[in-house]
Image (tube, rainbow, N blue to C red):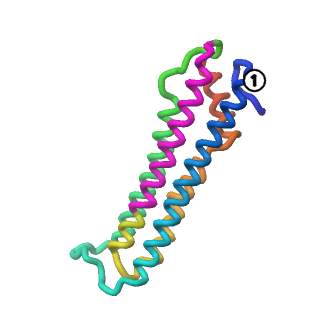
Amino acid sequence: MRYAWAMPLSQEDEPRIQVLLRTLSITAYAMFAGVALFAAIAAGIITQQTAPSTVAGLSIPLPAIGLALALGSLAASFVIKGALLRTASPGSAGDPEAFGKALARFQRATIVALALCEGACLFLIVLSIMEGPGALPWLAGLMVPIFGMVLHFPTRLRLDQFLSDSSQVH
């Protein structure tokens, strides 16, 4: 289903959709690039470290704590995105502003979900650096929040599904 919105889309709606998806894609790619660059820098730092962790008294490696928090952030990203997508009704399908409000909700929810996953990545990287030598394998744990970012990546199919779900609520 190409256009799932209950209200017929005008000729101005398609460019709005394309701009929204392009903007969200650029934002997501920038977040991926930031995580990749920071992970590469961290890998270089970790391989050059010779001193053990500066955090004494912990029996659990710091990256393990980061991985647990990353799993929590991943779950939270889906819960919060769902809550943001279900926020106050944007208006009835006949409301000319309803479409724009729905696009704004989709954009806001997608950026928040991506940011939660990105934050988990960065936190895990910082804890890996703090752990010191031997923490390099823990960077593989980045796959958990990165997988979340992939699942939240904005696509036309996801937007159409959201618009379809939004129009059925009204």
Residue at 73% x, 22% y: name it: 9
- Horizontally, residue 51 falls left or right of residue 41, namely left
Amino acid found under the numbered disc labelled 1 = Gln
Relative vertical location of residue 89 with respect to residue 44 in this rendering, above or below: above
Direction right: furthest residue: 1
Which stretch is magenta?
95-123
- Quick one: SS at disc 1? loop
Residue at 54% x, 41% y: name it: 110
Which image quarter holds the C terminus? top right
Residue at 70% x, 40% y: name it: 157
Residue at 60% x, 14% y: name it: 92
In-front residue for pair 71/16: 16
- Looking at the picture, how far across and down is residue 55, in whole percent? 25, 73
The quarter of the picture where residue 68 lies is bottom left
Relative vertical location of residue 40 with respect to residue 9 in this rendering, above or below: below
- Looking at the picture, how far across and down is residue 35, in whole percent? 49, 61
- Horizontally, residue 126 falls left or right of residue 159, namely left
Name the residue that disc number 1 marks. 11
Q: Does the magenta stretch include residue 122?
A: yes
The quarter of the picture where residue 67 lies is bottom left
In-front residue for pair 133/62: 133
